[in-house]
Amino acid sequence: MTGRGRRVPPGRSGRLRLRRSLATALRGADLLERKLRLLLDHERAARGAAREAGRVWRERLAEADGWLVRGVLLGGERALAEAVPAERARVDVRWGALMGVRHPAGVECAGPVRSAAETTAPNTALAHAEAAYRAAVRAAAEHAARQAAADLLAAEAERTRQRVRALRRHWIPRLRGELAAVELGLEEAEHEEAVRRRWAASHGSG
C-alpha cells in the first residue's frame, strides 16, 4: 500500500508503522493546536497594544501640530527653519521571539542633538513643538513595532492553522484509512489461516 510516495510494509510490520505514524500525527496536531491558541492570544494582545499605541501617536502628533502652528504664527517660516536641528532622530528596534516567531519587542528612540553652533527654537511655541514631535516620533515607532509584531504573529498563526487543517482533514484520515485496510487484510489472512488449519486438522485425522 502506498501513500504520497511512501510504501507501507505488508502485515504486522506495516500495521505497527501505521500506528506509530498515526500516533505521531495526532500528537503533532494537538501540539500545533496548542501553539495556535497561544499565537492567537498573543496576537490579540499585540493588536490591542497597537491600537492603544496608535491612539497615543495620533494624540501626540495633533499636539505637536498645534504647537507648530502657533510657533509659525509667532515667528514665521524663517523661525521654523531655524528651529529644525540638522541631526535626524534615530529609532532602534529591539527584536524578540515568541513560539518561534521573530518580531519587534520594543523600540529605543534617540532624538536629534543640537550642535553647539545651532540655535535653539526662537520662541516657546516652537520649543514645545519640538518636544511634542519627539514624543510623537517615539509613539509612532512604538505603534509600528506593535503593529508589526501583531502582523507577524498573525502570519504564523495562519501557517499553523493550515498545518493543523492538513493533518486533521487529510493526513490523519489517510493514515486511519490505510491502517484500517491493513488491519482488515490481517484479519482476513488470519481467518484464512484458521480455516486452513481446521481443514488440515480434519483431513489429517481422517
Image (cartoon, rainbow, N blue to C red):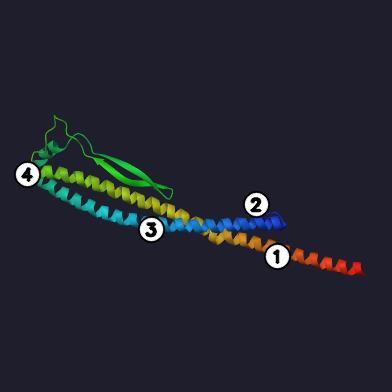
- The residue at which mark 2 appears reads as 6
Of circles 2 and 1, which is in front?
1
For label 2, the SS is: strand
Q: CA distance from mark 3 to mark 4?
A: 50 Å
Three-letter amino acid code at disc 4? Leu
Q: Earlier in the sequence, mark 3 or mark 4?
A: 3
Three-letter amino acid code at disc 3? Asp
Q: Are marks 2 and 4 in contact (CB under 8 Å)?
A: no
Q: Residue at x 14, y 45 (%)?
A: 129
Q: x and y percent of residue 194 in the render?
A: 80, 66
For label 3, the SS is: helix
Three-letter amino acid code at disc 2? Arg
Q: CA distance from mark 1 to mark 4?
A: 91 Å
- The residue at which mark 3 appears reads as 41
- Identify the image quadrant of residue 180: bottom right
Q: Which mark is residue 184?
A: 1
Q: Which mark is residue 74?
A: 4
Neighbour tally class for label 2: few under 14, some 14-19, many 20 plus, Cα within 10 Å: few
Neighbour tally class for label 3: few under 14, some 14-19, many 20 plus, Cα within 10 Å: few
Three-letter amino acid code at disc 1? Leu
Q: x and y percent of residue 134 in the render?
A: 20, 43
Q: Residue at x 48, y 56 (%)?
A: 32
Q: Are marks 2 and 3 in contact (CB under 8 Å)?
A: no
For label 4, the SS is: helix
